[in-house]
Image: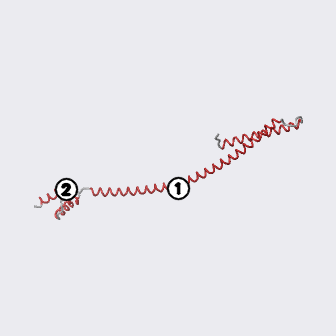
Amino acid sequence: MNLDLKDFMLLQTVLEVLLLLAIIVAIWLGRRRSKTQEATKMPEKLEKSLERFLSESEKIAQTFEVTLRDKKDLISDLILKLDRRLGDYRELLEVTRAAIAQSEQRLLELEGDIRQSLTAEAQNNQKANPAAPEVRALVLQLAKKGYSVEDIALRSKLHRGEVELIIDLEQQFSI
């Protein structure tokens, strides 16, 4: 039988009411006898029943008192444990929040780094305009110094064919 605190309280209240009724009946019977003075003694069966009832009620009340005290102690222990766990969870939540904030900051930094890398790479990967006079001058200057077509293409950011075309055109028109 698994009873909770409310059930014990209700049962104890009912028993106390029954005990009070039994006392009232006993008092009423005692006054009635004294008034009539016919019967000097309560019937033995009734007296034994009342005594047994009172004895059992007292035992049950004591058992309920002990049980209620035990339940109170258990509840107090549970509340303390829950308070400790709640404190631990709050600390863990704060640590997690700090870690999230750090991660967000690091992500922002990485995003900035990636943007810079992409911008620099995009600038490096842009091909030079072979028709631009400064590009033509660079190609011809490097060719005069004896650089290979591949080296000139890398340094001027042009395709190999464009470098060859510029050199060939310069040779044709300079004659």
Res. 145 image quadrant: bottom left
The amino acid on which the numbered mark 2 sits, given as a three-letter code, is Arg
Mark 2 or mark 1, whichever is nearer to me: 1
Tell which residue pokes out farthest to the bottom in this image.
145
Mark 2 or mark 1: which comes first in sequence?
A: 1
Q: Look at 24% across and 56% down and name the residue there.
A: 127
Point out the image quarter for the C terminus.
bottom left
Residue 150: image location, x then y, percent: 20, 58
Q: Quadrant of residue 23?
A: top right
Are the two marked residues, 2 and 1, in contact with CB atoms closer than 8 angstroms? Answer: no
Find numbered disc 1 in the image and state the secondary structure of the residue it sits on: helix
Q: Residue at x 18, y 57 (%)?
A: 163
Q: Specify whether 77 is left or right of 31.
A: left
Colouring rule applied to residues? secondary structure
Residue 68 at x, y percent in the picture? 68, 46
108 or 25: nearer the eye? 25
Crowding at label 2, few (<14), some or many (≥20) Cα neighbours within 10 Å?
Answer: some
Q: Residue furthest right?
A: 37
Q: Where is residue 143 in the image (x, y as percent from the top left)?
A: 17, 62
152 versus 26 height, above or below: below
At x 15%, y 59%, the residue is: 167
Q: Name the residue under label 1.
A: 91
Residue annotated with mark 2? 160
The kind of residue on which mark 1 rests is Glu
> In the rendered image of this protein, does residue 33 appear above or below residue 148?
above
Q: Which of the 4 image quadrants contains residue 60?
A: top right
